[in-house]
Image (cartoon, rainbow, N blue to C red):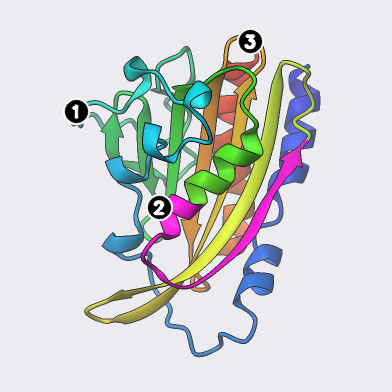
Amino acid sequence: MIIGIVVAAVVALVAIGATFMLLTQNHDDAGVGTPSESSQPSASTAPSPSTQPSVSSQPSASSQPGQTTTSSPKSGRAIDLGQSISLTPASGWTVKTKKVNLALLTNGSDLFNGQATTVDRSTDPKSMVDSYLTQISDGQGDVKAQRAKDADLGSSKIKGAGGTVSFTSANGQGSTQVIVETLVSVRQSDGVAVLGTVWYTKNSDLDQLKKDYPQMVLSMLKTQVR
């Protein structure tokens, strides 16, 4: 039931804030601001054959991000991610980059990456999460990670996991402590997978993120279990 998924997924995603405090303790001197260009997702940070847990769990060629489009759906209007998955932006979030199976959104300070792909249906979501976050934080400074944990998403149709990593991202104006949280869900019948990832800093509005992040992830999960 959708209701069960909503409740379970919200519980799984409300760690924002608490996770930030845990990973950034003893880092009071870290800079504030927005995630720098070097810490933002790109084609290289989307799950790719080189970062997947095994050959059997590699996304198919048809699921790889394609050319960037220029469409900019408004908040509340669903974005097609392929694989019959759609993402509905929360209020105040706009499209920064759109590719065939990926949409990068921003609210002006934080980033949200929604993606649909296809993996082997036996793929462990925890392995996908750990691989993805390792790829994102590769080359960054002061990396601290929490290994992925199973996430009960309230439906036998999908299997989920979530994880978090923090790192210091440097740019021409200084350094910023960045937190990245992701949730992966794999549909058990055919391997269609959904990834919902948020980038934020200690300068972010965590109370609002606790509402926006689950809302956007849930919009994808609902289409995944139809």
Residue type at numbered disc 3: Arg
Label 2 to label 3: alpha-carbon separation: 28 Å
Badge 2 is on which residue?
107
Crowding near pointer 2: few (<14 within 10 Å), some, many (20+)?
A: some
Residue 20, disc:
none
Q: Are marks 2 and 3 in contact (CB under 8 Å)?
A: no
* Image coordinates for residue 53, horizontal then vertical, percent: 53, 36
Label 3: few (<14), some (14–19) or many (≥20) C-alpha neighbours in 10 Å: few
> Which mark's residue is nearer the viewer, 2 or 1?
1
Q: Is residue 145 magenta?
A: yes
Residue depicted at 57% across the width and 47% down the height? 130
Label 3: state its secondary structure: loop
Looking at the rendered structure, the secondary structure element under dot 1 is loop
**N-terminal of the two: label 3 or label 1?**
1
In this view, the residue farthest toward the bottom is: 29
Residue ID at (75%, 31%) = 153
Say which element carries label 2. Answer: loop
Residue 48 in view: no
Give the magenta range: 134-151
Give x and y (percent) for residue 33.
39, 73
Residue 192 lies in what quarter of the image? top right
Q: Earlier in the sequence, mark 2 or mark 1?
A: 1
Q: Amino acid at mark 2?
A: Asn
- Write down the residue under mark 3: 226
Q: Residue 126 at what x, y percent from top left? A: 65, 40
* 100 horizontally vs 91: left or right: left
- Which of the marked residues, 2 or 3, is nearer the chain's N terminus? 2
Q: Provide the residue designation for mark 1.
A: 67
**Gap in Å between the C-alphas at discs 2 and 1?**
23 Å
Q: Are marks 3 and 1 in contact (CB under 8 Å)?
A: no
